[in-house]
Image (spheres, grey):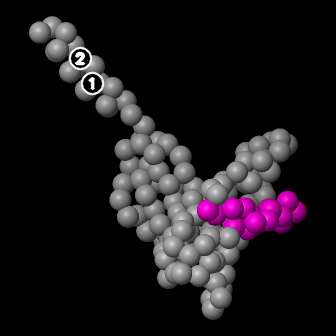
Amino acid sequence: MKRLRFLILLLLFSSCAMDYSYDAQIVNNSPQQIRVLITYDRKKLDSIYAGQTYYPYLQSIGQNPKTPLARFDSVGLIAEYIVPGNENLRIEDGIGGWDVAPNYMLIKEITIRSNTNLTTYPHNRLYSAFKRIRRGAWELQIK
């Protein structure tokens, strides 16, 4: 009986110590592919990395076989992704507390190109463009 109480207490304490994850995704709900260009803020990256290279980190963001990095411009710090129809591109993720939210501080702007539209989201519009769909999940829907 003591062991059962100990196990229950252990489970309660371990569940309180979990970190919650979050992510922000661009969701392509259209049947056609889109191109997503993410321009990163060089000043912020330079201040964080203090002379160390950050290109491998930027090139690894959003890596997924279904949404490959098509091109990376190291001069302009622009990552271009091809997102097929009805697929997602994760642009931000991490772990944190109960109500953690994405932080788009490294992103200067996001441009989305389809066959018919060109939409640019500057940094100051990213927080309102991505809608919270549940705890830990934000999406920018493309139709």
Residue drawn at (78%, 56%), measured in percent from left and top? Answer: 43
The residues colored magenta run 66-81
Secondary element under disc 1, as helix, strand or loop, is helix
Height in image: 134 above or below 30?
above
Where, by quadrant of the figure, is residue 66 drawn?
Answer: bottom right
Residue farthest to the top?
A: 2
Height in image: 91 above or below 95?
below
Q: Does residue 106 appear in this view?
A: yes
Q: CA distance from mark 2 to mark 1?
A: 6 Å
Secondary element under disc 2, as helix, strand or loop, is helix
Residue type at numbered disc 1: Leu
Residue type at numbered disc 2: Leu
The N terminus - image quarter: top left
Residue drawn at (85%, 60%), measured in percent from left and top? Answer: 74
Query: Which residue is labeled 2 in the image?
Result: 7
Query: Which residue is labeled 1 in the image?
Result: 11
